[in-house]
Image: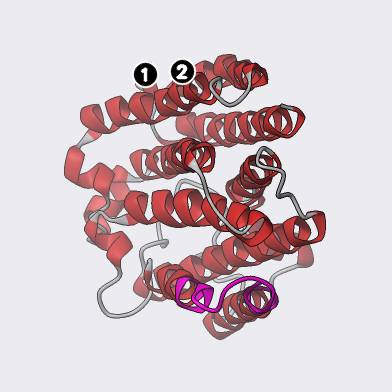
Amino acid sequence: MATAAQWIEGARPRTLPNAIAPVLAGTGAAASIDGAVWWKAVLCLLLSLSLIIGVNYANDYSDGIRGTDDDRVGPLRLVGSKLAAPNAVRNAAIGCLALGALLGLILVATSAWWLLIVGAACLAGAWFYTGGRNPYGYSGFGEIAVFVFFGLVAVLGTQFVQAGRVDWAGLACAVAVGAFSSAVLVTNNLRDIPTDSVSGKTTLAVRLGDTRTRTLHVVLLAVPFLATLALVARTPWALAGLLALPLAIKANEPVRTGKNGPGLIPALAGTGLALLIWSVVTGLALTLG
């Protein structure tokens, strides 16, 4: 039976910056057009955290019952390591996603009805990433989904529910956060190319191969800093986003120097940290500006 500490580890806390960052950036974008509503920002944060933990448990369950995690290099998986019953992990995923749905309904009730459709798409995307008969994460579409849901939808959704509209600055933030989040997944899938190839999990990294996946990581990490330069048109304070550049360079170091397996784990944490710092300083800069 899994301990509380193992359940927490199974929730993959290192991925939480992917949930926190879009809310920070989206709130900054809302504030830049005088539309920030702080209690809605808190609800957005709780919603985002609920969804990403739900996604992580859902992936743990789906990959575990398929046997994908039987020989794993990365963080603990509850089902794959047989520390928790599959049904228990599935129920934890459903519970987190249901909490996210409830929080989403509150935001829908105070903004726009059509966000129900967006919310339903988010829940479907969370479950069918590795769940169902034909999971899209097994066909190379994981990075696209992360870019859309944890970038475009999360940032622009946060801005919209607070300000009642979105603008180009919100879009720039959304592209930047989506690129960072996709880079996290690219790192994860680069590390898992050997085991994913054997288990039949055809991720984008498996399709591209080792060399081109490492190049993709560099490109994705460059995009947020191009967005930083664009955001200077909103406020010169946006240049503070460049403070995350050394972190991004450091995060890419294991990737560009050919590290494999456990050697890529620091790149995962480093990319997540660069994402979080960029979002904190950029969100603050847009608010002050």
Image quadrant where residue 187 sits = top left
Image quadrant where residue 246 sits = top right
Vertical side of 219 occupied by 141: above or below:
below
Vertical side of 58 occupied by 133: above or below:
below
Q: Is residue 145 magenta?
A: no
- Residue 44 place in picture, x, y as percent: 68, 60
Residue at the spot x=46%, y=46% of the render?
73
Q: Which amino acid, by three-letter code, is at mark 2? A: Glu
- Residue 18 place in picture, x, y as percent: 58, 47
Please give the label number shown on residue 188: none
Q: Seen in the image, is 210 located left or right of residue 238?
A: left
Mark 1 is surrounded, within 10 Å at the Cα level, by few (under 14), some (14 to 19) or many (20 or more) other residues, namely some
Q: Label 2's element? A: helix
> How far apart, in angstroms, are the residues tagged by discs 2 and 1?
5 Å
Could you tell me how many numbered marks the image carries?
2
Residue at the spot x=67%, y=37% of the render?
32
- Residue 131 place in picture, x, y as percent: 38, 75
Residue at the spot x=50%, y=52% of the render?
150
The segment highlighted magenta reads 103-119
Give 55 or 103, whichever is nearer the viewer.
103
Q: Seen in the image, is 245 located left or right of residue 120?
A: right
Residue at mark 2: 253
Please give the label number shown on residue 256: 1
Q: Label 1's element? A: helix
Give 32 or 60, whichever is nearer the viewer.
32
Q: Seen in the image, is 137 located left or right of residue 286?
A: left
Mark 2 is surrounded, within 10 Å at the Cα level, by few (under 14), some (14 to 19) or many (20 or more) other residues, namely some
Q: Which amino acid, by three-letter code, is at mark 1? A: Arg
- Residue 181 place in picture, x, y as percent: 48, 43
Residue at the spot x=41%, y=27% of the render?
223
Q: Which part of the image, by quadrant, shows the C terminus?
A: top right
Dot 2 and dot 1 residues touching (CB under 8 Å): yes
